[in-house]
Amino acid sequence: MRILKSKWHILVCLIITLIAYVPMFNAFAESSADIPKPKSNYSDETRCVEPVAIMRKQHFVYLLEHRDKTVIEGIRTTQYSLNACIDCHITPNAEGEFARYSDDTHFCASCHQFTAVNIDCFQCHADRPEEAIRKTRNPNTTVTAHTQEIHEYLQLGETQPH
Amino acid sequence: MRYKLDLDIEEVNTDRRDFLRRAATVGGLAIAPGVILYQTGAAKPADQAVSSQQRWGMLVNTNVCQEDCDACVTACNEEHGLWDLGRPETDAQWIRKLNVKDKQTGHVTSLPMMCQHCENPPCVDVCPTGASFRREDGIVLVDKHTCIGCRYCMLACPYKARSFVHEPLQDQLPHSPRGKGCVESCTLCVHKVDRGDNNTACAEACAKDGHQALLFGDLNDPSSEISKQLKQHGGTQIRADLGLNTGVRYQGI
Ligand code: SF4
Ligand code: SF4
């Protein structure tokens, strides 16, 4: 491309691109403030099951490998289990409501929407912890230890934003 | 003129099935000697693969199964989130109650019918994608990641044990993922088995209602209650003539 031959032009292109992206980053930063925090850190040393930067890029690789082990071999470790991700990341908001994957504030959806990724995991898999789903089916379901645990944890305010 | 169907169980030729299975599992055999043993009944360590040391099965005592009771069906639907869509023709059905009447004597036998967790499952034989498979511990499952919804397995199953999901679902439960376009059937509560519950939702519900018609256990462990019962009182396979060696056995039929 002839236009890119001059360094000057390349610089202008770069600046325009960057400026165009700024509002999108802002939008993402704003919306992520509404997303409920994860239930806990994975361990004392790490927030998530792998460093967060790796998880952002690679979580589906771990999930893909783990799914066959679980379905075929019955291996039920929680480190790369989708259910464990959901249990930790999908927590109730201030009103005690759990977001569905179709909501902007669902942890998975918030990022997939931003990056324009279409997945079909949640056509079959639960997008909320079991208790939230049972509550949807039957509002009289009593609060279980799971919610109790989350509430206690969140009140302590130890969770870092993801 | 009537023909007598003279089929001996031993005579069912399963050579072809065995051959196919051997061909498919050559890779797996090499791993077997490294498998570590664990105590039956206790939860297996989560990081350990299931092994053929176990063969999970179920014994149904139709003598105590009540004609008007469907506690097992309700419990299954609740456990796996098989929410009623109000369309009985197509709603998923992993376990159903059958009442069979002997026309001669008028005696009614009531029994639950579900996937029989065959050792030689026809559903697995016909599946073109390998989605339908038998786990090492005898539980027959559908890997819904690979199922293309062709429904061959539903035709092949002699027990009409499988259901097809016809429409988008909501509110599936974490331990029982299910969705449109896939075939599904009784999983023998595989999530409970892996957790070490050593029981299924239907058997628990039956016991809770005081009927004790369902007994879950390890057919390979001679000291398990199910093996003892089977040894002492025997148990029938439905359509034993097919030579499928079902994991679900019945008494009183
Ligand atoms: S009962 Fe039907 S679905 Fe179950 S293993 Fe046998 S053939 Fe397959
Ligand atoms: S419907 Fe799915 S499990 Fe059944 S035979 Fe077809 S691909 Fe296999």
Image: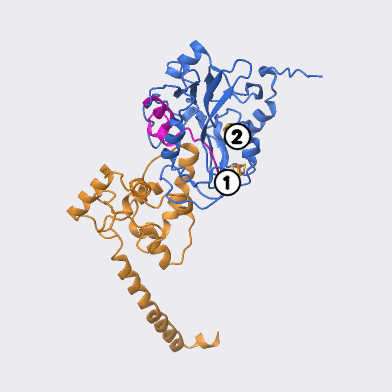
The stretch drawn in magenta includes residue B194:
yes
Residue A80 visible to the viewer: no
Residue B145 colored in magenta in the image: no
Q: Which residue lies furthest to the left in this view?
A: A156
Question: What amino acid is labelled 2 in the image?
Answer: Lys
- Distance from mark 2 CB to nearest ligand 1 atom below 8 Å: yes
Task: Please name the colour scheme applied to the rendered image.
Answer: by chain
Q: Position of residue B61 (x, y in %)?
A: 49, 19
Q: Quadrant of residue B192?
A: top left
Residues B40 and B80: in front is B80
**Parent chain of label 1:** B
Q: How crowded is the residue under tag 1: few (<14 C-alpha within 10 Å), some, or many (20+)?
A: some
Q: Which chain comes out blue in the rendered image? A: B
Q: Residue at x 27, y 60 (%)?
A: A161
Question: What chain letter is assigned to the residue under label 2?
Answer: B
The boundaries of the magenta stretch are B182-208
Q: Name the residue under label 1.
A: B147
Q: Earlier in the sequence, mark 1 or mark 2?
A: 1
* Colour orange belongs to chain: A
On the question of residue B109 being in view, the answer is yes
Q: Is the CB atom of the residue marked by disc 1 within 8 angstroms of ligand 2's nearest atom?
A: yes
- Measured as percent of width and height from the top left, residue B85 is found at 49, 47
Q: Are callouts 1 and 2 both on one chain? A: yes
Q: Look at mark 2 in the image and give the residue it sits on.
A: B160
Q: In this view, does A50 lie above or below B80?
A: below
